[in-house]
Amino acid sequence: MRKHEYKATLVRKGASIGANATIICGNEIGEYAFIGAGAVVTKPVPAYALVVGNPGRQVGWVSEFGHKLEFDLSNKAICLESGDTYLLHNNNIKKTPLKE
């Protein structure tokens, strides 16, 4: 047995993993990331990232409600369902909740 070689795989809060997706051990799936069906994830996935294909490639960003985010020139996007604002900076997403 080579159990000492096992690597931990971490799936963060709210992440979605599609049917028949494969996550190579030792990788982290960020909060609210969306892994498409059949994708093969070979490296860590940032929070809110949309990953598809084999090998898995990031093709965009999604909101906590799973809607694809479209960023404007100021790197700001708004979720169509919640109205929350998302800011993209250095390939990281920061969510700003809707103020009521």
Image (tube, helix red, strand yellow):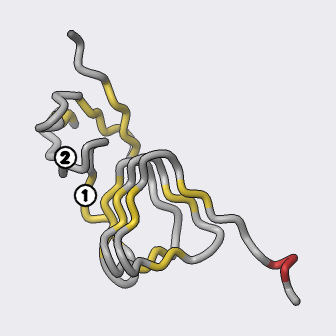
Tell me the tag on residue 69.
2
Question: Is 32 positioned to the left or the right of 72 in the image?
Answer: right
Nearer to us in this view, 13 or 72: 13
Q: SS class of the residue under badge 1?
A: strand
Residue at the location (29% across, 33% down)?
87
Quarter residue 59 falls in: bottom left
Q: Contact (CB < 8 A) between labels 2 and 1? A: yes
| Residue type highlighted by circle 2 | Leu
Nearer to us in this view, 27 or 20: 20
Residue ranking furthest to the bottom: 1
Tell me the tag on residue 68.
none
| Residue type highlighted by circle 1 | Gly
Q: Is residue 10 above or below residue 37?
A: above
Report how far apart the C-alphas of labels 2 and 1 lie in the structure: 7 Å
Q: SS class of the residue under badge 2?
A: loop
Screen quadrant of the C terminus: top left
Rate crowding at label 2 as few (under 14), some (14 to 19) or many (20 or more) other CA atoms within 10 Å.
many
Tell me the tag on residue 60.
1
Question: Is 11 positioned to the left or the right of 89 in the image?
Answer: right
Rate crowding at label 1 as few (under 14), some (14 to 19) or many (20 or more) other CA atoms within 10 Å.
some
Query: How many labels were placed on the picture?
Result: 2
Screen quadrant of the N terminus: bottom right
